[in-house]
Structures are given as structure tokens and as C-alpha cells.
Image (cartoon, rainbow, N blue to C red):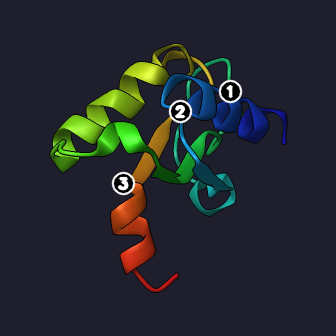
Amino acid sequence: MKTLNQIQAILQEKLQAEYVEITDRSHEHQHHKGRMDAPVGSGHYDAVIVSNLFLGKTIMQQHRMVYEALSEQMQTTIHALSLKTYSPKQWSAIDH
């Protein structure tokens, strides 16, 4: 839970995200070999992020912004990260 809260706090701060949802999917990847310092299968997350900073950016640019914000965690606690990024207008237009 600590890692989920940390990821959420970083994204809210660095991307000024108004909504962040992080789901830990590590249990679905128990067969994967992890980093030497991490339990097997750890660090697999899904993230939904809504930020005004994504306005006018391509999906690729939005994802790069997330990876940059989480650069330290990508080297330590995050092994895999599935992203869904939205501007507030895009988020309000979808059924969720």
C-alpha cells in the first residue's frame, strides 16, 4: 500500500493530477522474474491519471510525462506500468 500511495502522491504533485487511480496487478505476474532486490512478480501497476497538463498533448507525450514524473520509481519499485491518461474534458466524456 505504501508504494501505491507514493505513486499517487508523486503524480498528483508533479503532474497536478486531479484524479489518480493506481491498481496493483503484481499478483497476476507471480511467474515473472523481477529485479534481484524485489519479490518475483512485484511492481506491476495500472494507472488512470487525469491532468490539465495533458491538454493538447499526444498520448505519447502524456505517457512520457508520467514516466518522467516517476523516473526514480521506474528504477526501483515499478517493474511495469500500464497507463490511461486523460485531460479533464476527455475524462468527463467517457463512461467510467
Q: In the rendered image, which residue does mark 1 sit on?
A: 38
Horizontal relation, residue 79 to residue 77: left or right: left
Residue at the image point whose x is 68% and y is 26% from the top? 38
Residue 64 figure quarter? top left
Question: Would residue 96 appear left or right of 5 to someone viewing this image?
Answer: left
Circle 3 SS class: loop
- Marks 1 and 3 sit apart, C-alpha to C-alpha, by 33 Å
Q: Given the current orientation, which residue lies at the most extreme bottom position?
A: 95
Dot 2 or dot 3: first in sequence order is 2
Mark 2 = which residue? Answer: 16
* Residue at mark 1 to residue at mark 2: CA–CA distance: 29 Å
Location of the N terminus by quadrant is top right
Q: Who comes first in sequence, dot 1 or dot 3?
A: 1
Q: Residues within 10 Å of mark 2 (few under 14, many from 20)?
A: some
Cα distance, mark 2 to mark 3?
A: 11 Å
Under mark 1, the amino acid is: Ala
